Image (tube, rainbow, N blue to C red):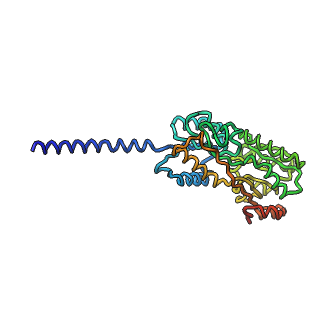
Amino acid sequence: MQFDQWKRRSFITLLGGAAAAWPVAARGQQAAMPVIGWLDVRSPNVSTEVLRRFRQGLKEIGYVEGENVTIEYRWADHRIDRLPDLAAELARRPVTAIAASGAANPALAAKSVTSTIPIVFIVGEDPVRLGLVASLNRPGANLTGINLFSVELSAKRLEILRALAPGATRVAVLVNPANATNAEVTVRDVRAAADSTRLRIDVFNASTIDEIDAVFADFERERPDALFVGPDPFFLSRRVQLVHLATRHAIAASYSSRDYIEAGGLVSYGSNIADAYREFGLQVGRILKGAKPADLPVVQVSKLELFVNASTARMLGLTIPPTLLSLADEVIE
């Protein structure tokens, strides 16, 4: 009898110990959930679609936010000077990986605060030239990512703009000086492309809503024949304002993505942003699964798209050349 009582007491003690251990185990599993630090130069209200596609890529590789991965968001609200502090916050967290989104600036800020946390970027410029990676195939450190080619397409965008506005001799180039590297490369490439076409290039700067308004007010005096809007996250967030002003001033304008054309812009040529952010999610997922950034090649976005708004062309009195119509991925009416 005493033996039976001892067995019962031993079983109860063992059961109680196991029950006490379960919450500890559960907490251990929860703590092990990977954390992505999302570092973005933009505001959350202008990034709904890119986040949706990023999460889609994560899901395809096996990660669902809130289930087996956590995302810590840090938004700079287009204040580039805030990025280093936001990156440092994420590094102190610490996160499993940093997803640097929106431009080169978040990636550069993240790189400046950590050499150990994996960083995955999505940029519109050559990441080797930016100093983010040693090479595209063998990045070599704690960074890898996606190259959108947004900035490198300046010459082709200028060619398309000239095809739509063949009489243009003066082209205004709008850049954001707060995004200095992007602005410098855009102006350099547009000027180089214009040299062979005898186009006059006039550069205009805008970093705020009021400055955009001021630039278009200057157009009343300067009278450019066409407008080249540089690829910049701030400009994309102000696409309705830019398209409205271009329409009001009856100026043929070229943009870097379809979003402008859906808002009524004339023409865009650039990478498929939605597909790029899906690939961005996949690339981050590969890191979470154990891939090392040093060995994970930078993904070169290969799908470039041309969109033309036929209604806007008619309103501006422009004829879309048949060759351009045949090349367009979509002509929006």
Q: Residue 139: which quarter of the image?
A: top right
Name the one closer to the observer, 299 or 197.
Answer: 299
**Residue 63, horizontal then vertical, whole percent:** 50, 51
**Residue 154, horizontal then vertical, whole percent:** 78, 48
**Residue 150, horizontal then vertical, whole percent:** 72, 48
Name the one closer to the observer, 158 or 291.
Answer: 291
Q: Quadrant of the N terminus?
A: top left
The residue at the point 65 percent across, 43 percent down is 137
Q: Quadrant of the C terminus?
A: bottom right
The residue at the point 57 percent across, 35 percent down is 88
Q: On the picture, is 104 further left or further right than 57?
A: right
Q: On the picture, is 306 further left or further right than 24?
A: right
The residue at the point 53 percent across, 52 percent down is 61
Q: Residue 295: which quarter of the image?
A: top right
Name the one closer to the observer, 101 or 298.
Answer: 298
**Residue 204, horizontal then vertical, whole percent:** 80, 44
Q: Residue furthest bottom?
A: 333
Name the one closer to the observer, 63 or 299.
Answer: 299
Q: Residue furthest left?
A: 1
Question: Total marks drawn?
Answer: 0
